[in-house]
Image (cartoon, helix red, strand yellow):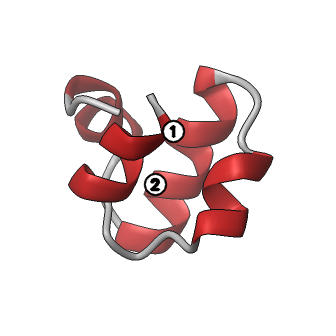
Amino acid sequence: MLNVIGTNWDKYSKQEISDLKTNDEQVTQIVAKYGIEKVAAQARPT
């Protein structure tokens, strides 16, 4: 899963990826880093 996040969301550092524990944390970080809506972040593969 961590490799997929790094591939699909290239603004993440390896440390940030390893710190993510839940899907909700992932979505929150995606919304903050990419400025997209929560629904769109949830729809994209993590």
**Does 46 sit above or below residue 14?**
above
Residue 39, percent from left and from top: 31, 30
- Between residue 25 and residue 36, name the one nearer to us: 25
Residue denoted by label 2 = 30
Q: Secondary structure at mark 1?
A: helix
Task: Please say if the residues under marks 2 and 1 sit with CB atoms less than 8 Å apart.
Answer: yes
Residue 7: mark: none
Look at the picture and state if 29 lies above or below 44. Answer: below
Residue drawn at point x = 70 percent, y = 23 percent = 22
Q: Which residue is rendered at x = 64% and y = 27% of the image? A: 24
Q: Indicate the position of residue 17 as horizontal and vertical percent values.
A: 61, 53
Q: Residue at x 25, y 55 (%)?
A: 7
Q: Secondary structure at mark 2?
A: helix
Spot occupied by residue 18 in the image (x, y as percentages of width and height): 71, 49
Q: Which mark is residue 27?
A: 1
Q: Amino acid at mark 2?
A: Ile
Residue type highlighted by circle 1: Val
Q: Residues within 10 Å of mark 1 (few under 14, many from 20)?
A: many
